[in-house]
Amino acid sequence: MTQREVLEQARICLGPYCKGCEICNGRACRNQIPGPGAKGAGDTAIRNYDKWKEIRVLMDTICENRPVDTRCHLFGQEFAYPFFAGPVGAVKLHYGEKYGDRQYNEILVAACAKAGIAAFTGDGTDPEVMQAATSVIKAEGGRGVPTIKPWNLDTIREKLKQVRESQTFAVAMDIDAAGLPFLKNMTPPAGSKATEELSQIIQEAGLPFIVKGILTVRGALKAKEAGAAAVVVSNHGGRVLDQCPATAEVLPAIAKAVGDTMTVLVDGGIRSGTDIFKALALGADGVLIGRPFVTAVYGGAQEGVNELITRLGTELKDTMAMCGAHTLAEITPDMIWR
């Protein structure tokens, strides 16, 4: 399938909120919750997208002519590319009736594993969501990352049991999910975590722990203090707090602050292999991509996911070759203009 064919098929079965836009930039769905949109003015998702486009790449072809290697090593695993499918939950509510979370994850996790990357899976108020996600990951040899909401400690412990049974190589918590409107008044409630609470959770997890939802150096250093192996620089696509800065704006300072002491991932408006290159040049070790994978699943199932991964990988390779970087380690800040 081509990208256009995937989009055309997705538009047939997506619900009333996501428009299956050719350019997924947050404009058509602003302030659409339920739906994929950002909260309030809805411009945080838009800003995420726009800021990556303001950064330009600097071509340099006076260099060795040798093959480009996009492989990366994170959490003791080798991946074909430095990007992952981001966690998405309640797909039937936000994207349309075609898939529930179990079916969505069955397609996504398997397709990502087959293509040499991994998918992060979402969580939800229905316990079946985590049960299904972890069972799918186990079926793929642990090639996926379950993402837990910041519930109360007892609920987190229950979910961590399922996570460990999945044989995954890492676990994540989208700690900023406490701000999701449809989770605030749920039972059990999602909530912020003090450094001491987070440290206890990380110790009990017994796996490399990824804290998603970091926007400040202060937040990254607190996650490090708690024992996290990685952070995801993220504003949750603008869905938890209006008027946040773009992730591209805060990434460099966070990456500099933690240095090589922890893995730094980033999400938010990343839509091309060239955007992935820019993120790595700003200091990220890898990126998460959310909404485009939803469109890929709805429009083409595993074939749609494979099309997206192949296209992003090809774009990344082309950008690396034209900027004189033949490995991910060779991507440096002086290869971009901002």
Image: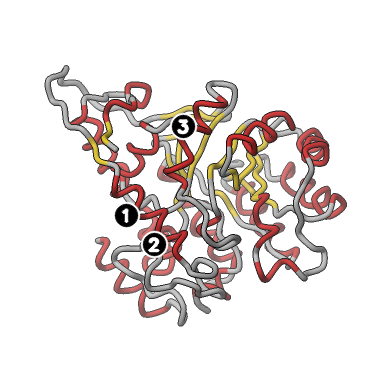
Residue 283, image x and y in percent?
Answer: 43, 30
- Disc 2 secondary structure class: helix
Residue 153, image x and y in percent?
Answer: 85, 50
287 to 322, vertically: above or below: below
Q: CA distance from mark 3 to mark 2?
A: 24 Å
Mark positioned earlier in the residue sequence (3 or 2): 3
Q: CA distance from mark 1 to mark 3?
A: 23 Å
Please state which amino acid type lies under the numbered disc 2: Ala
Q: Where is mark 2, residue-wise?
A: 296
Q: Which mark is residue 285?
A: 3
Q: Residue at x 34, y 27 (%)?
A: 333
Q: CA distance from mark 1 to mark 2?
A: 8 Å
229 to 124, vertically: above or below: above
- Give the quadrant of residue 26: bottom left
Mark positioned earlier in the residue sequence (1 or 2): 2
Q: Horizontally, is 53 left or right of 249 in the view?
A: left
Q: Are marks 1 and 3 in contact (CB under 8 Å)?
A: no
Q: Where is mark 1, residue-wise?
A: 307
Please state which amino acid type lies under the numbered disc 1: Glu
Q: Residue at x 43, y 76 (%)?
A: 14
Which quarter of the rendered picture does the N terminus lie within? bottom left
